[in-house]
Image (cartoon, grey):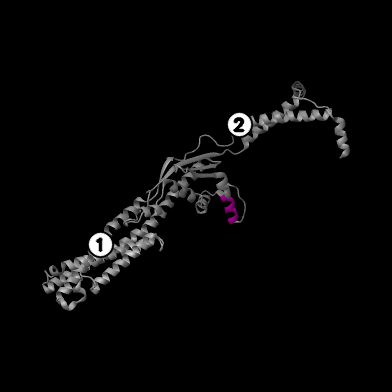
Amino acid sequence: MEKREFDFFELIRLIIRNRKFIIIFVAVVSVAAVIYSLVTPQIWRSTATFYVLGDQTSSLPFNIEGLSDLSAELMGTTNSQNAINAVTAMNSRQFSEKVIRHFNLIDYYEIADKDSLKAMDNALKILHTKTMKIGSDSETGLVTVSAETKDKKLSRDIVNYYLQQLDIYNREEKITRGKINREFLEARTNETRAEIDSLLIELKNFQQKHNAFDIEAQTASLIQTYSDIIATKMSTDIELELARKNYAENSPVVLELKERSEALSKQIKQLEAGEKSIKPRYLIDIGSIPDLATQYAQLKMNLEIKSKVYEFLYPQYEAAKLEELKDLPTLDILDTPREAGLRVRPKRAVMCIIAFALAVVVSIIIVLIKNALELNKERWQEIKKEL
């Protein structure tokens, strides 16, 4: 078989000989590309970029000695994590279905399925694959939201709606968490305040009735010691109860508070049983102290205990109210969504250039194939006979 080498001049001769076919083929394809680029829908993009700002750490509304680092590690968040949470929320089914219903995208996508569930699933698929692009930078935490539709105003409105719904979601989700701590502390603070008021009235009535104004001088040190332990025990119990609302039962925070509470309970029992040298006998051995002194000491002790508990609770309650407000994530928007000035698709000039180039190449290939068939008519006839 004779081996034929590529002949550039032969190629030029074939192109010139078939120039009419090549020109017509290229012209037809180019005109078709121009018509397609004019007829195909124009796609417009609107984009917004923002940071999700919030406290870098979210800790308990009170300070547990030695556990500040642990609470920060367990409950702390960063801007990158906030961004990931925002992207996850916006890509969720609940978020997406709100967008589809709000802008009636099932009709916009021309989904004619009568099954509403199937139509919604198809709309969700198109929304995530063709319309929306939502992502974040893992290093900077910058979130990008963009929408591509056939209407530049619709693209802008969809992005705006995502930002509005994200802000609402952040506020409702964070307020719900903050309320748990704030409402708990508020209830305990009000309860303790009411108990103090009741004790003050009872103490005043006792003093007026019995003229007992100096009895506490004899038992002041005992009252101080016992009330300090009781107040510490009650404060620890409050910390334990609130920690259980934020941590699991077997967490280091809860286990340490339980151990501290049990140790204080044991110490109180030892004092009341007289196993230690400092013993509040005005509570247990009533016969050794005059009845009035015992009653008066009991009132003063209860009042001091409640006062110490209130001194502990009230600052924490105020801190919880502030944290409920300041811990709300906010959107720091860098680029607000706007109507696009340039379309994303179709890129008419690029499309026409590519179509023209492909038409030239294809037409030359056709000419070469035609020429090869003409030069090998006999072999082609043999092939036909075999068929």
In the image, which residues are magenta? Answer: 116-124
Is residue 326 in sight in this rendering? Answer: yes
**x%, y% of residue 174?**
40, 54
Image-based side of 111 in relation to 274, left or right: right
Q: Residue at x 55, y 37 (%)?
A: 344
Vertical relation: 259 (above or below) 147: below
**x%, y% of residue 309?**
26, 63
Report the residue marked by disc 2: 350
Q: Residues within 10 Å of mark 1 (few under 14, many from 20)?
A: many
Disc 2 element: helix
User: Is residue 294 located in the magenta-colored stretch of the structure?
Assistant: no
Q: What residue type is disc 1 on?
A: Tyr
Disc 1 element: helix
Q: Which quadrant would residue 374 be assigned to in this image?
A: top right
Separation (CA) of disc 1 from disc 2: 75 Å
Is residue 196 in sight in this rendering? Answer: no
Q: Residues within 10 Å of mark 2 (few under 14, many from 20)?
A: few
Q: Quadrant of the N terminus?
A: top right
Image-based side of 185 in relation to 52, left or right: left
Q: Residue at x 62, y 34 (%)?
A: 37
Q: Which quadrant would residue 248 be assigned to in this image?
A: bottom left
Q: Nearer the viewer, residue 12 or 132?
A: 12
**x%, y% of residue 254?**
37, 62
Report the residue marked by disc 1: 310
Residue 274: mark: none
Vertical relation: 328 (above or below) 146: below
Q: Residue at x 21, y 74 (%)?
A: 283
Image-based side of 181 in relation to 228, left or right: right
